[in-house]
Image: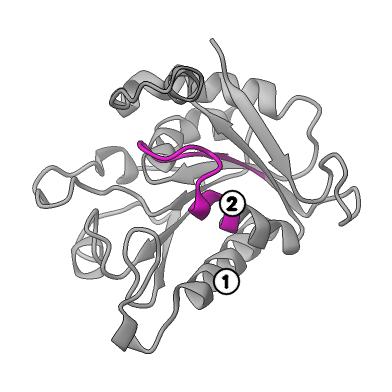
Amino acid sequence: MTITFLSSGPGSPDSPLGDTPDATLLLAHGAGAAMDSAFMNQMAELLAARRIRIIRFEFPYMVSRRETGKRRPAPKAELLMDAYRAAVFEGFAGVTGKRAIGGKSMGGRVASLVADELHEAGDIYGLVCLGYPFHPPGTPEQLRTKHLENMRCPALIVQGERDPFGSRPEVESYQLSKSIAVTWMDDGDHDFGPRGASGFTRKSNLAAAADRVANFLRNL
């Protein structure tokens, strides 16, 4: 199984921020964008500035896409669980301190599917989902929340208020576990971007997301 990693922030090679991060977060990418997408790069930079070490990785299908240039649909989330487990085993090798897993969109969903078992084994302290895909856009009846109803692992979901994969009114109607906190990005879409006339900016939303993720990780 081929998994590619990218590390940034304190404790990473050539980091100017010192050697000891407040926490380490393993992040998976979304279904269609690689680990070095604009969103992933921006979040990694913002979290590194807040003393969070970020280890990004790509699932094997994305590694193949990068190597061959051929775009194939992402596998079902359930079929990526073993790859996520392997990434935890390899990516956290030698990593001490507070460790958490998560991802953007689909990557966060896959992380959520393995979070309880990894938390109970003592491998991770928590879970972070950046834009959780509660349902496919346009089909709110196709919920992906069953395993979230009884989740035991401490979790933070950062969600845009207008996210087509789960808007604020929709998500606030769900029966989610008390171990899950949801924080909202003002007028944000799936990448936390607000509408131009809203009075909010994507830059401020991304900074707010990074603040809340960093605080969550420090308090695990």
Q: For the residues carrying marks 1 and 2, which lies nearer the camera in this image?
A: 2
Residue at 72% in and 56% down: 48
Please identify the residue farthest to the front as the structure is shown.
69
Q: Secondary structure at mark 1?
A: helix
Residue designated by label 1 = 207
Say if 88 sits above or below 127 in the image. Answer: above
Is 26 part of what is drawn in magenta?
A: yes
On whether residue 144 falls in the magenta region, the answer is no
Label 1, label 2: how far apart the Cα atoms are: 13 Å
Whether residue 219 is visible to the viewer of this picture, yes or no, is no
In this picture the colour scheme is one colour
Viewed as shown, does residue 183 lie left or right of 3? left
Q: Amino acid at mark 2?
A: Asn
Q: Secondary structure at mark 2?
A: helix
Q: Amino acid at mark 1?
A: Ala
Indicate the position of residue 93 as horizontal and vertical percent values. 75, 24
* Residue occupying the point 68% across, 28% down: 91
Q: Is residue 67 left or right of residue 198?
A: right
Q: Earlier in the sequence, mark 1 or mark 2?
A: 2
The percent position of residue 5, horizontal first and vertical second, equals 64, 29
Magenta stretch in the rendered image: 25-42
Give how far across and how far down residue 103 sits, in percent: 48, 43
Of 84 and 122, which appears nearest the observer?
Answer: 84
**What residue lies at 24% left-to-right and 53% top-to-bottom?**
165
Label 2: few (<14), some (14–19) or many (≥20) C-alpha neighbours in 10 Å:
few
User: Which residue is denoted by mark 2 in the rendering?
Assistant: 41
